[in-house]
């Protein structure tokens, strides 16, 4: 089996690509409890307003909403609790240095399962200004127009 067949996407953060330029991408494991893993498998994850922070050499994801598992009863945790991410110390230190020097931020981009383990793709991002968003929208519209013209000529 190739690598792509073992990756099962669960959730995407489309707003991140709208609001930020993604400079680098990293893969991180997520520290979850059993009922949270079951909710993630059902796709009940929302990354819309989430971000990552680094404290004491550890990286955490804030604002990621994992809905409570329906059959979880007393074992369910707080849906928006702060969760620790699992990354190599060297990667965390690199991200921390980039954040402090260049004023970048770390944003979760997607959640997926790789070889049975929940993973979070995080991106080192730079915020877009309003004119950047307009420019991106104009480029997409021009590309759509070109595609329409090409398909109508065939």
Image: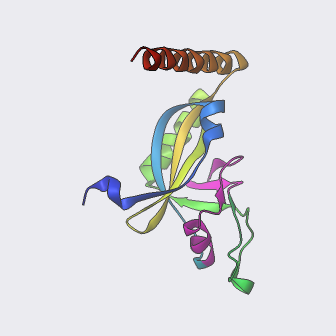
Residue under the point 63% across and 54% down: 61
What x and y, as percent, mark residue 22? 53, 33
List the single residue furthest toward the left.
1
Please identify the quarter of the rendering in which residue 5 is found. bottom left
Relative side of 37 to 82, left or right: left
In the rendered image, residue 65, in percent from the top left (x then y), is placed at 70, 59
**Viewed as shown, does residue 14 lie left or right of 92?**
right
Image height of 83 relative to 100, above or below: below
Colouring convention used in this rendered image of the protein: rainbow
- Considering the image in quadrants, where does the C terminus appear? top left
Q: Quadrant of residue 135?
A: top right
Quadrant, the N terminus: bottom left
Q: Which residues are magenta?
A: 35-64
Q: Nearer the viewer, residue 5 or 31?
A: 5
Please name whichever residue, 31 or 94, is drawn nearer the observer in this view of the structure: 31
Q: Residue at x 54, y 16 (%)?
A: 145
Q: Nearer the viewer, residue 107 or 145?
A: 145
Q: Is residue 56 visible?
A: no
Query: Within the magenta stretch, is there residue 39?
Result: yes
Q: Position of residue 59 (x, y in %)?
A: 58, 54
Query: Whole-percent x and y of residue 95?
Result: 52, 41
- Residue 72 shows up from this direction: yes
Q: Is residue 149 magenta?
A: no
Q: In the visual, does 149 lie left or right of 60?
A: left
- Quick check: 116 above or below 71? above
């Amino acid at each position: 089996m190739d690598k792509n067949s073992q990756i099962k996407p669960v959730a995407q953060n489309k707003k991140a690509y709208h609001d930020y330029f993604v400079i680098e991408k990293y893969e991180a494991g997520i520290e979850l409890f059993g009922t949270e893993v079951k909710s993630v498998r059902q796709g009940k994850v929302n990354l819309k307003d989430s971000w990552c922070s680094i404290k004491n050499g550890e990286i955490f994801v804030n604002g990621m909403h994992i809905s409570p598992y329906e059959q979880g009863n007393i074992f369910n945790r707080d849906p928006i609790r702060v969760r620790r991410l699992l990354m190599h110390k060297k990667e965390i230190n690199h991200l921390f240095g980039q954040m402090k020097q260049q004023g970048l931020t770390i944003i979760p981009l997607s959640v997926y399962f790789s070889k049975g383990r929940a993973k979070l793709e995080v991106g080192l991002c730079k915020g877009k200004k309003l004119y950047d968003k307009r420019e991106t929208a104009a480029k997409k519209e021009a590309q759509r127009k070109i595609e329409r013209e090409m398909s109508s000529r065939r």
